[in-house]
Amino acid sequence: MNNEIIDITKIEVSPKDYWKGLTYDDALLYCELLTIDGKDNWRMLKNYEEFYFLSTKINLEPWKSAWFSSDATQYPNDAVLKIIPVRDI
């Protein structure tokens, strides 16, 4: 884990109905275009550390393959991984 401090009280996780299996580019576009209850500032999880800390806040099942914004070059262009939209509040 890095030294970044993650304040999970300032991150909202989207409802599970909005979690999708997408390619990285599609995941970026999905978050950019997503509007839930009038809220439109959704983004991908930044990294595994953010996912880990959020999993303590709500019941997130551990995944071995979820997209993080830091993953841009880690997988082939056509890889499909889970996207969990979140937003800073």
Image (cartoon, helix red, strand yellow):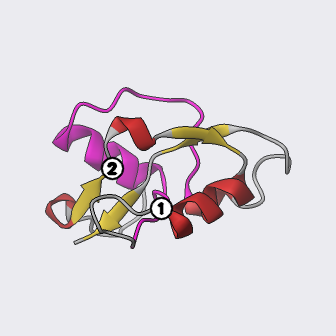
Q: Quadrant of residue 5?
A: bottom left
Task: Determine if the magenta segment contains residue 55.
Answer: yes
For image coordinates 23% across by 30% down, the residue present is: 59
The disc, 2 or 1, on the residue closer to the chain's N-terminal end is: 2
Q: Name the foreground residue: 34 vs 19.
A: 34
Residue 73 left/right relative to 86: right
Q: Secondary structure at mark 2?
A: loop
Q: Are marks 2 and 1 in contact (CB under 8 Å)?
A: yes
Q: How many marks?
A: 2
In the orientation shown, which residue stands out farthest toward the front?
A: 38
Name the quarter where the N terminus is drawn: bottom left
Q: CA distance from mark 2 to mark 1?
A: 10 Å
Task: Determine if the magenta segment contains residue 56.
Answer: yes
Q: Name the foreground residue: 62 vs 17.
A: 17
- Range of the magenta residues? 41-68
Image spot of residue 4 (x, y percent): 35, 70
For image coordinates 73% across by 59% down, the residue present is: 25
Name the quarter where the C terminus is drawn: bottom left
On the image, numbered disc 2 is attached to which residue? Answer: 14
For image coordinates 47% across by 61% down, the residue present is: 34
Q: Name the foreground residue: 86 vs 70.
A: 86
Image spot of residue 76 (x, y percent): 85, 46
On the image, numbered disc 1 is attached to which residue? Answer: 34
Comparing labels 2 and 1, the label whose residue is closer to the camera: 1
Q: Quadrant of residue 64?
A: top right
Q: Amino acid at mark 2?
A: Ser
